[in-house]
Amino acid sequence: MRKIPSVDALLRSDPGRRASAALGRPVLKRTLNLVLDGVRRDAARGTEPPGPDELVARAASLASWATSGLTRVINATGVILHTGLGRAPIAERAARAAARAAAGYGDLEVARETGSRSPRSARAELLLTSITGAEAALVVNNGAAALLLCLASLARGKRVPVSRGELIEIGGEFRIPDILSASGAKLVEVGTTNRTRLSDYRAAVDERVALVLKVHQSNYRLVGFTAAPSAKSLAGLAHAAGVPFVYDLGSGLLERYPGVPADEPAAVEALGDGADLVIFSGDKLLGGPQAGIVLGRAELVARLRRHPIARAVRVDKMQVAALESVLSVYATGRHAELPVWRMLHEPADEVHRRASRLARELDGELSGAFVVRTDSTVGGGSLPGHTIPSWAVRLRVPDAEATAARLRTGSPAVFCRVEDGAVVFDLRTVPESDLPDLRRAIQYAREGDDLADDLADE
Ligand SMILES: *Cc1c(COP(=O)(O)O)cnc(C)c1O
């Protein structure tokens, strides 16, 4: 323990001074503290502490991870809406709109004709109601916030029946029962995990019920002996009882587009089935920025808009700008041009062409790079079990996990799959323009393998 230097001594050392000038003294001080905590814990278990230069190097590496910010990643996992990698990549023009909104002033909350105040999401809401035919729309920070706002505004202190098969966890601590209790609504569980009937709901609906909630199972599927009442029959039941029917769709499929499995609900269909409000995310199948979108009856949307939580979960100007841009693409019927839809619909032949080019450039079969058939997935809690035929480059390496780790920490960073001792690059989620960078990253990571082999031989 006595061999471990103090934070102050390390900050005063030459490497410490250089790192602190480059990265900021408060950040380096903090990361030195974190590194020393770890080293002290190890020392207590008998591990020799590293020298001072190594301690500074570890702290500087942690500090530069924070100060250099989000790193660009090439997504070769074949998971289109990869939650860890930021879900939907947005269209170039939407990204430019967001950057413009961020870097300067804009007419975010003023009407230019009159100079008076105008809600920041008014443009996006006009586009949403135009595209879907909904009476009214509301845009908030994310899907979870939209559901919380809806329940707090309409069901606080009252009961909400939900099927036991729909009490889902989306990941990242988002669980339907927890959102209900945080909103002040009381969950009434109906039915069983695999089978829920309309009569189960009917038995639960009395004068203490505020609304009937249906939640799309999103990231899991029930198969086998299952039953669930249709949205239409639930709407009928709710309306007969004089309460709204709210449908949390999750994914933001606006209409029934070809190539999307029928069990993924679309907003227009749900509204047509009688849903009074539908809720979905902006950055899943919609292919936009993070946002939570509510569509439905004007009188209900107005109650949500007036609730204090609406202000607490409002959208940022960059989100607004990107969403407006994405929605205007939908409005003109060009949504197939959005990156998410391009990746979903690109013919496998096109993906094969990119895979062949990559394999060829990696020196073909001599170096153990093979083009293989694979399956991409949608991810992001959408369409579980649904796969899209794709093509990948499969590369045999001495230690696939180590190569994958080197690829993740390289520059540009590459995320791939590890399968049966090989690294696998699914080209469906890699655009043509990323191929040269991907090839360089792979070659660089393999040189590390050669190095490891040489060291092992020695
Ligand atoms: C994803 C999802 C949410 C949460 O939306 P976020 O935008 O991630 O906050 C809520 N409900 C369902 C059914 C979902 O699939």
Image (spheres, grey):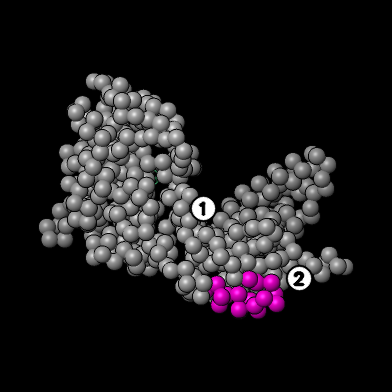
Q: Pointers 2 and 1 in contact (CB under 8 A)?
A: no
Residue 311 % position (x, y): 29, 42
Q: Quadrant of ligand 1?
A: top left
The residue segment tinted magenta is 354-370
Assess disc 1: are there few (<14), some (14-19) or many (≥20) residues with their C-alpha within 10 Å of its C-alpha. Answer: few
Tell me: 195 left or right of 279: right
- Local SS, label 2: helix
Above or below, comparing residue 450 to residue 285 in the picture:
below
Q: Residue at x 35, y 50 (%)?
A: 262
Task: Please name the residue that numbered disc 2 is placed on.
Answer: 450
Q: Is residue 359 magenta?
A: yes
Residue underneath mark 1? 84
321 relative position to 399: left or right: left
Q: Residue at x 30, y 38 (%)?
A: 230
First in residue order: circle 2 vs circle 1 = 1
The answer to whether one can see residue 153 in this image is: no
With respect to residue 248, does 376 lie above or below? below
Which residue is more in the foreground, 100 or 324? Answer: 324
- Residue at 48% across, 56% down: 387
Tell me the kind of residue under disc 2: Asp
Q: CA distance from mark 2 to mark 1?
A: 30 Å
Quadrant in which the N terminus appears: top right
Residue at the image point whose x is 86% and y is 67% from the top: 457
